[in-house]
Amino acid sequence: MESIALLVAATLNAGTVLAFASLGLLVNERSGVVNLGAEGLMLVAAVAGFAVTLGSGSVWLGLLAGAGAAGLLAAVFGLLVIWLNTNQYAAGLALSLFGSGFSAFVGVRFTQERLPERAHAFRVPLLADIPFIGPAVFRQHPMVYGAIALTFALAWFLYKSRAGLVLRAVGESPESAHALGYPVRRIRLGAVVVGGALCGIAGAYISVVYTQLWVEGIVAGKGWIALALTTFGTWRPTRVLLGAYLFGGVTMLQFHLQGAGVQIASQWLTMLPYLATIVVLVLISRNAAFIRTNMPASLGKPFSPGG
Amino acid sequence: MLRLEPRAEPGRLMSVLSPVLALATTVVLGALLFVAVGKDPVRGLGLFFVEPIGSAYALSELAIKATPLLLIALGLAVCFRANVWNIGAEGQFVVGAIAAGGVAMMAGPTTGRWIVVPILLAGMLGGMVWAGLVALLRDRANASEILVSLMLVYVAEMLLEYLVYGPWKDPAGYNFPQTITFLEATRVPHLLPGTGQRAHIGLLLALLAVALCWLSLFRTYAGYQLQVVGLAPSAARYAGFSSRRVLWLAMLGSGAASGLAGALEAAGPVGQLTPHIPAGYGFAGIIVAFVGRLHPVGIVFSSVLMSMFYLGGELAQSRMGVPRSLTGVFQGVLLFTLLACDTLIDHRLRWTRRSVPGGG
């Protein structure tokens, strides 16, 4: 029982990284822009967050720095694809490649550093003391609950608020939104920056809260998995969150199995999340009509107002 | 205010000038970066752009780096032209190296030089299998080739680690995660034996691939179909061109090229399998392909440029104590600025008096 509670707790923790990143990408893609640079954004945010937390001693400042750094880079990407109509795939790849190079370059001096050990867990009063459920769910870093809150806030924003309706309209049919007088390109830029900042929080969470250290390439494909999760969750916040926990679980299962003494080379277990991503993509994409009805209709297509 | 205005026709001059402009911007940013870390920018840039072409030995090292980049980028250019987003060349490279290594380790003390041919073929086959998986899942299940090919990079790296930490580990290797050093007969022949230069005949194979790629893209019906499918999918459908066939063609061709690059690396300069086989060539190849305008001849130049970045990064680390990952920064900046400069192919800058309504 104890170990299962720990597995659940670890799953929620790992899922939080994926949740922030894929919710960010969801906002991004709802506006019609695909950002393949998520991995690079998360890497830059991870090193920025680590540096700031190391210098200031504050986890929150670190997360904020990660969001800021990634938001800024995402803005550059946004200008490129929204105003200059650069191919979104190519520009996103450029961002990922730049991010991995830049973070490695800046991060060299941090590879030996460690953040001071501290108790991250936030005990939800009363609930944290319930046997089994307490240690499994209610003794987490506040950002774990932040991800859940963000999911519902985002669901409300997209489906119940006027601004959310406008955002969806921009992603479905930028021409119509433009004809109605909405500043399509500025709305898209806003979505790209917000999405980038959320990826940044995810990246900084990895280095500042999750591992509390910096190594080159620390994100290890989570940005790409987050991209797959938006498809998996058919661009709906709650489904994306569930997907994030599912993948968090798969990631954690490998350590759990190793801990349980399963006789299998660690490399096969490390492969699991990547293989799971492929399997999930295959299962969800098989139904092309289902994807088409759920996907923002203008996803990946450039828009220029004929002015 | 300065305004972007669409051109009636793509500017031919700009399409050649754009990479030059991007390179110039990268050099300026690079110089600033050297200043920012408190190093002499002139000396630093010299390590990147002068030293790697300064001697016969340096040129040979340049060729060693340019060979895999050239091969990989050729394959990727074919994919990108077909609008197939294979970004997992790194994985295809690794599996090519694994397959080649597997054959190389079968050689005994009496094996002749002929073994090099099956080694290279095995590499190509390995890359094709890995790329074929992507094509299969795209074709049969409509799964995004971007994500599948990328996920398979991690899977390939883990496969390599499993082999060199496990069943293929050199029993006499002091427990290091590496295979035996491949026998002399299995090694890719040097271009200039006896000079101590490591450049190998892979360079000739890569140049042969350039010619083959050019011919098949611009002089065959299949190449024509491939480009139409990439540029105008609906026109291609109307003409009855099969986009599925193009997908398979592009992926398998690209996988073979990346796999060959991996085989040449494993049986060439490295001479064994280690976890350090994946050196990022697969990702750098994406940049090489774009900077070379997705054109076989352009890619020859851009692969040389990119290998200068690699050598420059190594030199900057050993001589000036600047982290070697500077190479990655330069690569990323180059692709970014190139994409920005490419705007000028379809647009021109116009100075207008008033701001024009209807922007936003």
Image (tube, rainbow, N blue to C red):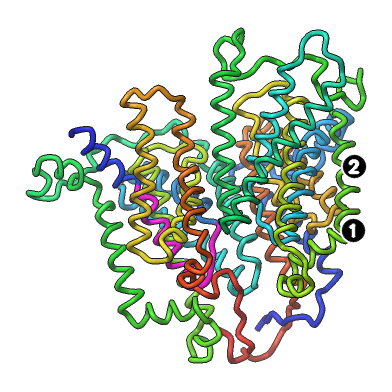
Residue B220: image tag: 1
- Mark 2 and mark 1 in contact? Answer it, CB < 8 Å: no
| Helix, strand or loop status at disc 2 | helix
Gap in angstroms between the C-alphas marked 2 and 1: 17 Å
The answer to whether residue B117 is left or right of residue B25 is right
Question: On the rendered structure, is B92 left or right of A164?
Answer: right
Specify the amino acid type for callout 1: Thr
Q: Which residue type carries mark 2?
A: Leu
Q: Which residue is drawn at 20% across and 42% down?
A: A136
Which is more N-terminal, label 1 or label 2?
Answer: 2
Q: Which mark is residue B208?
A: 2
- A31 is within the stretch colored magenta: yes
**Which residues are the magenta region?**
A15-36
Q: How crowded is mark 2: few (under 14 residues within 10 Å), some or many (20 or more)?
A: few
Q: Which residue is drawn at 45% across and 42% down?
A: A273
Please name whichever residue, A49 or A232, is drawn nearer the observer in this view of the structure: A232
Using the image, name the chain to which the residue with label 1 belongs: B
Compare residues A193 and A39 and report the one nearer the observer.
A39
Type of secondary structure dominating the magenta stretch: helix
Left or right placement of residue A24 versus residue B101 in this view = left
The quadrant the C terminus of chain A occupies is: bottom right
